[in-house]
Image (cartoon, grey):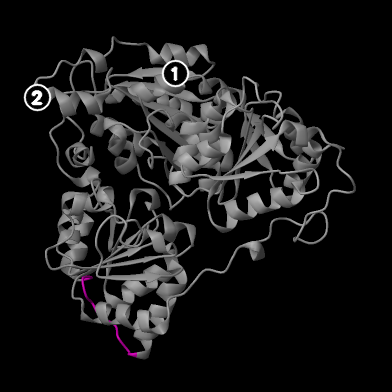
Amino acid sequence: MNIAEAVGATLARLGVDTVFGVVGSGNFHVTNALVAGGARFLPARHEGGAATMADAYARVSGGLGVVSVHQGPGLTNALTGITEAAKSRTPLLILAGEVAASAVRSNFRIDQAALASAVGAIPERIHSPESALVDVVRACRTAVAERRTVLLGLPLDVQAAPHAGPVTIPEYGAPGSPLRPSAVLPLPVPPPSAIARLVEALTAAERPVFVAGRGARAQGAADALRVLADQCGALVATSAVARGLFKDDPFDLDVSGGFSTPVAAELIADADLLVGWGCALNGWTLRHGGLVGKNTTVVQIDVDAQALGAHRPVDLSLIGDVAETARATGAALTAREHVAEGYRSPEVAGRLARGRLWRDVPYEDDSERDRIDPRTLSIALNDLLPAERTIAVDSGNFMGYPAMFLDVPDVDGLVFTQAFQSIGLGLATGIGAAVARPDRLTVAALGDGGALMSLAELETAVRLGLDLLVVIYDDEAYGAEVHHFGPDGHPLDTVTFPPADLAAIGRGFGCEAVTVRRAEDLGAVAEWLAGPRDRPMVVDAKVTRKRPAWWLEDAFRGH
């Protein structure tokens, strides 16, 4: 056995059971060793797609995502997906071949560790045959315990060296032991004095609002936050990536920020206390400060000290695990026998019942003879789709429509790869999510620009036989740029395109497909949903383009 084979066997014994990637000579042996150890390898058509598939798989499955790529161009092809994962704190392990130190003139030589650092990933390497398995375990531990994206460089000369002795897992017990939860470092809880300050803020508040983000989702804090919110009368909301965390709570505002309905935005802006739980409180979530009242007290709780106050000033910050901090705060309120109606009045409940969802907000249907209003399209789709679904959304002018008009069953129902704001990730996101949750229909919602960047991965979806509905909001343009620059009279030839028959392209890859210009054209989707759904379906929806999405004006303030 050589080191490449030992590394693959070690990863399989640690519990890696699914790997995405594109195989070249530099990652051929380690990938085969993973497969021999029982992992399934799912080849993509492009490394960028593979990285995003692994990212989405990790988000939806709750485990470690793994992607395997060739050295040099294999890694650079994957870099946009890696950047999204790193910015999203996805536990992702990139297995990348690496040029041997002695091969100074290799065409594949680049500073791979520097690339990782530049985009926020953690560079690691198997340094020698003697340290290789310790290096592997360290990289996995960093990815899982710290929720980081880790690049594990696999130098070719080290891979080829012989491995002496059996494959054991350093620090984790006997061979066959998985990477256990006990390997994850304990998370901090704020000291009693800090909890007391939070309690004082909650007891003084008349209109508290909780906004939970990625940290609350990752730390399984939904139940603890629901109990605490009920105890102190807080309304609850989430950032986009945590949508569904408070599903079915009558005082759920849904998403805070640019995606908020008018009712939700008004209630958030009128809060006298705003508490961010594992939430960055960035410009997206608070509309660049527009959802923070002049006299609102802002509190932020996060396990990462560097996240506190990173995007806006806060009045009180606490370093702590979201769930444990919520429980400790609830216990302190119970000791005071404090229970308050707060913001949870019958009047507020009535307003939310009428205006929590965007489909309940009246609008003028802009549908034309040959184009459908994206709101009308999304509402009609929502009524067709089964309740058990996963919605994966690409970036672009269109993205608010599927993200907010399509219901999600729970916090795993929306996969929102938007931390880097790159278009072209949506299809791969949908594929990774579908692999992670084959029990649910996955909807990949794309713009035509992002779809055309990533269409090669339709072959991957067909080959894997995924239960995947690909909905393309096709305005034949980079719509965000059209609506951002068009009103000022700028020429738009660089961001508009002639029509393309995306349904025909989908059929060419082996998908079912339909072009939708009006709601009744969705009958073909209903037929596909009825079964057997043995191949993906592509919906080329020709959507209207006379006005920008409602959230776009706020979004471009950050550009």
What are the residue bounds of the magenta stretch?
336-344
Horizontal side of 492 relative to 245 (left or right) equals left
Question: Is residue 330 among what the camera can see?
Answer: yes
Q: Which residue is tagged 2?
A: 488
Frontmost residue, 477 versus 381: 477
Where is residue 216 drawn, in percent x and y?
42, 61
Secondary element type, mark 1: strand
The single residue placed furthest to the left in the displayed view is: 488
Q: Residue at x 23, y 53 (%)?
A: 286
Above or below, 398 relative to 62: above
Q: Residue at x 57, y 24 (%)?
A: 73
Q: Earlier in the sequence, mark 2 or mark 1?
A: 2
Above or below, 510 relative to 308: above
Frontmost residue, 338 versus 176: 176
Q: Residue at x 38, y 79 (%)?
A: 329
Residue 264: numbered disc: none
Horizontal side of 523 relative to 356 (left or right) equals right
Q: Is residue 300 magenta?
A: no
Query: Which tag is nearer the camera, tag 2 or tag 1?
Result: 2
Where is residue 402 drawn, in percent x and y?
33, 37
